[in-house]
Amino acid sequence: MDESEIKSSGATTLGNLLRGKVSGLSMLSFDNAIDGSTQIFLRQNGTNNPIPAVFEIDGIIASGYPEFLDVTQIKRIAILSGLSAVAKYGSVGAGGVIIINTNLGNFSLSNNKTRGEESLVKGTANISAITEEEVRRNWPDFLQELYRSKQLDEARAIYDSYESQYGTNPNFNIDAVNYFLEYWKQESFTKDLLSIALNRFNNGFNYIKALAFLMDKYDNQNQSVQLYKQLLLFKSNSAESYRDLANAYVQNGQRERGKNLYARYFNLVQEGYFSEQPEALQQVINTEVAVLLEIKENQTDGPLSGLLDKDENKTRILLEWNDDTAQLDFQFVGPNNGVSN
């Protein structure tokens, strides 16, 4: 929920604000007080011993229900439940996390820059990058157990013990497929597991795109192409869908198909088919097409003229994620192990 939705709700308490807004949310309040000793549960109706959600307010985990919070100061609310909460917060997030950003937490500095911007201006950061070991401490239990296993039979037993509980969770399936492709790619069990994963949630765009990323990662280009075809059918008005499939064709050795789809994309751009055209994505496509067609400077004419402009010599980092509605913060680690946001 963003600030406009929060204000239009007319709610005067956090409990009333959340009630009816979050699927699967239930509340338990003691002493007949909606904002007294209250616990909030996220999608755990079928659990015998449900775990209450915790609150993160402006980056700080609150102990118990934040009855001190002034609803009029809330700028944004986000919900993390299930494995996604556990992956980021560890066991403290087992019941889900309700993330709240307030206007008070986004104060400005004297030069009207936020603290993150100040770090960039100075060129250094006040924090150090976390290690891979520290990252793994926040993984869900099943993933930590899988990566500690030494034999395929042991890994299979761990997977089977959790599959009955988490098999309907897309994140569980993605994580499991990633592990078995990384360590046991040639095993028949992994091939069977991949086949099952490909047939699960076949109407879920974010899930299919995550699987497509995994197929790219482990050089399963034939399957990658098939998944990107599905994604283009899901979002045929998305420039990114055309780029992803065209690039997948090229990576799979089907250069002519890739060329034809890139050409189709440029024609649609000229026809104004795409309502929004991200500049960064266009730069990526320009570079890919120039490399594919072996176009040199001053050789762009015809339908590509004006779209393949001369580019400065620079390094680009291409970041892709499967959920185009996600809001992300990127941190770059320097040679001295410092972090800039």
Image (cartoon, rainbow, N blue to C red):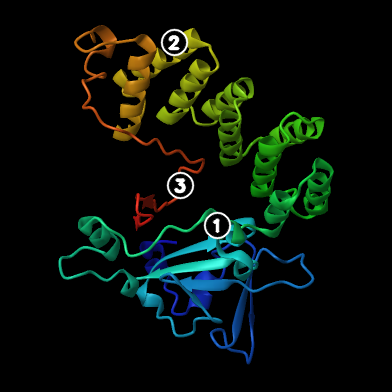
Relative vertical location of residue 82 with respect to residue 243 in this rendering, above or below: below
Q: Callout 3 environment at 10 Å: few (<14), some (14 to 19), or many (20+)?
A: few
In the rendered image, is residue 109 in sight? yes
Quadrant the N terminus occupies? bottom left
Residue occupying image coordinates x 59% and y 27%: 230
Are the two marked residues, 2 and 1, in contact with CB atoms closer than 8 angstroms? no
Can you identify the residue that label 3 sits on? 325
Can you identify the residue that label 2 sits on? 260
Residue occupying image coordinates x 62% and y 20%: 222
Q: Marks 3/1: CA distance?
A: 24 Å
Q: Marks 2/1: CA distance?
A: 42 Å
Residue 47, horizontal then vertical, whole percent? 77, 67
Horizontal arrangement in the rendering, residue 341 relative to residue 55 (left or right)? left
Three-letter amino acid code at disc 3?
A: Thr
Foreground tag (3 vs 1): 1
Horizontal arrangement in the rendering, residue 159 relative to residue 77 (left or right)? right
